[in-house]
């Protein structure tokens, strides 16, 4: 019921280098905060580099699980591993300095709790909402189809912890056993080296006719694929509170979902859960 006015301070932008962002937040952002006379500073990326201004409350949010998983970090090259190690330290120090911390899943809070047992004293869990178009009410009931005619959709960035390659191998194995398999549509930004490995796997496994790499696209273009698909897949092995899984739930179609945390917490009862590493 309090009259709260929000003001966004523009930062250097997503295209700026990491060092540029650190320099900006160390030396320039604290000046803007002090001059603006703010009561609360919200840090949605969970990384506070600059000094804290006296009399101002700092609220941070935990969104990125990767820096806290040694198993997943080990799959990247040296530069990425170093970056995630730095982010791990910065995030932990941010939580220490924050007055309050927001988690977007209980699973994520349990990970930080194992490192910082006192985090419960100043944290809460607030789940994400969904802004994806709701077209569940206007879709036709899914009719039974032959396996070869089924279309499966997986929307997520092409990356090793998203396990698109394991999906391609699973489909190839299914085709080897049954002689047929569903078609798999993969939508996701492909700027990482993993995309080249994924393309090679599709080619080498002889699945170019059944696995379509559609690349990245905005929500407005994804909706058509959601409507045309018969089932949805989410195969990530590490998440915080996955927006994409929430979008799939809005689509009201069968979802084959990773059994790794926090997916069971987010999706609830779902008999189509699997180990994405297998």
Image (spheres, grey):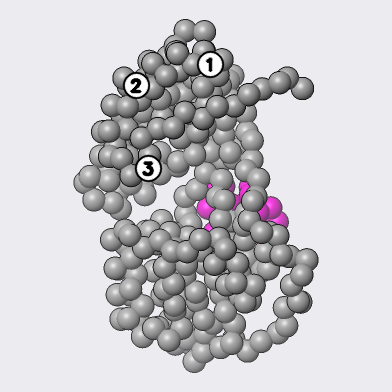
Quadrant of the image occupied by residue 176: bottom left
Please say if 40 is above or below 170: above
Please say if 208 is above or below 252: below
In primary-sequence order, the first of circles 2 and 3 is 3
Q: Which residue is mark 1?
A: 38
How many marks on residues? Answer: 3
Task: Give the percent coordinates (x, y) of residue 39.
Answer: 56, 15
Q: Which residue is mark 3?
A: 14
Task: Give the percent coordinates (x, y) of residue 255.
Answer: 63, 65
Residue 269 lies in the magenta stretch: yes
SS for callout 1: loop
Label 1 with label 2: CB-CB less than 8 Å: no
Q: CA distance from mark 1 to mark 2?
A: 15 Å
Q: Which residues are magenta?
A: 258-270
Q: CA distance from mark 2 to mark 3?
A: 17 Å
In primary-sequence order, the first of circles 1 and 3 is 3
Q: In the rendered structure, find residue 225 and report the number of the disc placed on it.
A: none
Image quarter where the N terminus lies is: top right
Identified at 63% across, 56% down, the residue is 132
Label 1 with label 3: CB-CB less than 8 Å: no
Image quarter where the C terminus lies is: bottom left
Residue 214 lies in the magenta stretch: no
SS for callout 2: loop
Q: Which residue is mark 2?
A: 28
């Amino acid at each position: 019921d309090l009259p709260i006015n929000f003001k966004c301070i523009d930062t250097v932008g997503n295209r700026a280098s990491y060092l540029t962002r650190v320099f900006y937040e160390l030396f320039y952002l604290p000046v803007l905060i002090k001059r603006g006379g703010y009561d609360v500073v919200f840090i949605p990326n969970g990384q506070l580099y600059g000094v804290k201004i006296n009399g101002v409350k700092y609220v941070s949010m935990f969104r990125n699980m990767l820096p806290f998983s040694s198993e997943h970090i080990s799959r990247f090259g040296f530069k990425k591993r170093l970056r995630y190690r730095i982010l791990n330290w910065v995030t932990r120090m941010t939580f220490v300095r924050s007055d309050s911390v927001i988690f977007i899943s209980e699973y994520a809070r349990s990970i930080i709790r194992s490192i910082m047992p006192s985090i419960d004293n100043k944290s809460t869990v607030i789940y994400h909402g969904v802004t994806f178009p709701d077209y569940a009410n206007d879709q036709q009931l899914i009719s039974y189809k032959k396996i070869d005619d089924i279309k499966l959709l997986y929307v997520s960035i092409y990356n090793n912890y998203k396990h698109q390659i394991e999906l391609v191998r699973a489909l190839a194995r299914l085709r080897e056993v049954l002689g047929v398999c569903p078609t798999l549509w993969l939508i996701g930004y492909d700027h990482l080296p993993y995309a080249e490995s994924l393309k090679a796997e599709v080619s080498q496994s002889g699945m170019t006719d059944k696995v379509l790499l559609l690349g990245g696209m905005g929500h407005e273009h994804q909706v058509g694929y959601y409507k045309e698909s018969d089932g949805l897949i989410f195969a990530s092995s590490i998440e915080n509170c996955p927006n994409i899984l929430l979008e799939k739930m809005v689509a009201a179609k069968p979802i084959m979902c990773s059994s790794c945390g926090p997916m069971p917490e987010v999706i609830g009862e779902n008999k189509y859960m699997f180990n994405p590493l297998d």
